[in-house]
Image (tube, rainbow, N blue to C red):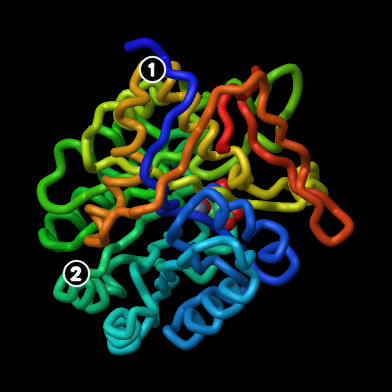
Amino acid sequence: MNTPSSLTLRRPDDWHVHLRDGAMLAAVIAATARDFSRAIVMPNLKPPVTTAALAAAYRERIRALVPSDCDFTPLMTCYLTDTVDPADLRAGHADGVFTAAKLYPAGATTNSEAGVTELARIARVLETMEAIGMPLLVHGEVVDGAVDVFDREAVFIERVLAPLRGRHPALKIVLEHVTTREGVAFVREAAGPVGATITPHHLLINRNAMFAGGIRPHMYCLPVAKREIHRLALREAACSGDPRFFLGTDSAPHLRSLKEHDCGCAGVFNAPSALACYAQVFAEERALDRLEAFASLNGPAFYGLPPNERRVTLECCEDFATPDLPVDGEAVRVFRPAGALRWRVT
Ligand code: NCD
Ligand code: ZN
């Protein structure tokens, strides 16, 4: 297929995004609301969003900041803790406040201190979710300090995810921001409802990007970028048309001062460039005809929601500029590939 110079598709949704709160939320919301119709909003605020009441209040704060010319629906998630109340989760889901719940192994990533220490502690919660068809969104990394950082996803699949799949065969599970070929293989072959989100940055960089000429804090996120073989497996999965793989940016803004730091935060902010980055990857893979499935069809099908009716158009350009986003007298760096970014949303 020749690469077309423009492309119109159903509007995508972002099935994994960090919108934060307060001044950061105010600064970043427009970028997501402009390009995506819906987004699964991560609950790792400080304090985390652990009840339906907290989620409803957070949803109001988001809605109040969506630009008036954007048609955008935030879909809320519950941050699972050892003590989360299954009745509140069930009621929140029935009321349409909670779309899904997020499992952070305690200590795995940014603001995950309150996460689950042992899956056995939330067995009743998982049974409830399985019964009501509420998806479990998983940060798939073990927190065992004895396991190499680059192996934590593969070990999580073996030690935690595969047994979990066996115990709850009907539970909808999303392996969020999959980064390894082991993760891709698990998702492809697993029994029952399993999906995975794939980020633009994990499709565009491998771990060398963190060390290109010096330490590159803006290329650091969790799960950390892996070797090239893994990036290639992710590109193959995203572009394959397999309905189990769908778009989730994991856009995770942190101030530059907190990234360029002695102990820099994990997270890549890509909301302004995400759609352009995905288009670039699919164009490079000669798979632009499959971008709509990945970006706009597979996610809604997994979540049991209708695809969006509105359309978005992407077009080729010389180089899409990605200036820092000002926030509260500081700035957030926007993710972009090493070379030119040759697509933009019109
Ligand atoms: C995320 C964040 O900053 O909230 N960071 C990241 O590197 N992806 C948390 C997460 O999704 O793991
Ligand atoms: Zn995330």
Which x, y percent locates residue 71? 50, 63
- Asked if residue 320 can be seen in this view, the reply is yes
Q: In the rendered view, tell whether residue 181 sits above or below residue 118.
A: above
Q: In the rendered view, tell whether residue 94 sits above or below residue 127.
A: below
Which x, y percent locates residue 130? 17, 69
Q: Residue at x 54, y 74 (%)?
A: 48
Q: Quadrant of the C terminus?
A: top right
141 displayed left or right of 257: left
Q: Residue at x 71, y 35 (%)?
A: 322
Q: Residues within 10 Å of mark 2 (few under 14, many from 20)?
A: some
Q: Residue at x 40, y 53 (%)?
A: 15
Which x, y percent locates residue 82? 39, 76
Determine the CA span between mark 1 and mark 2.
35 Å
Label 1–label 2 contact, CB within 8 A: no
Q: Which mark is residue 285?
A: 1
Q: Quadrant of residue 25?
A: bottom right
Tag 1, which secondary structure?
A: loop
Q: In the image, what residue type sits under mark 1?
A: Glu
Q: Residue at x 89, y 57 (%)?
A: 329
Q: Is mark 1 within 8 Å of ligand 1?
A: no
Q: In the rendered view, tell whether residue 129 sits above or below residue 167.
A: below
Q: Quadrant of residue 135?
A: bottom left
Name the residue that disc number 2 marks. 133
Label 1 vs 2, first from the N-terminus = 2
8 displayed left or right of 225: left
Q: Nearer the viewer, residue 252 or 290?
A: 290
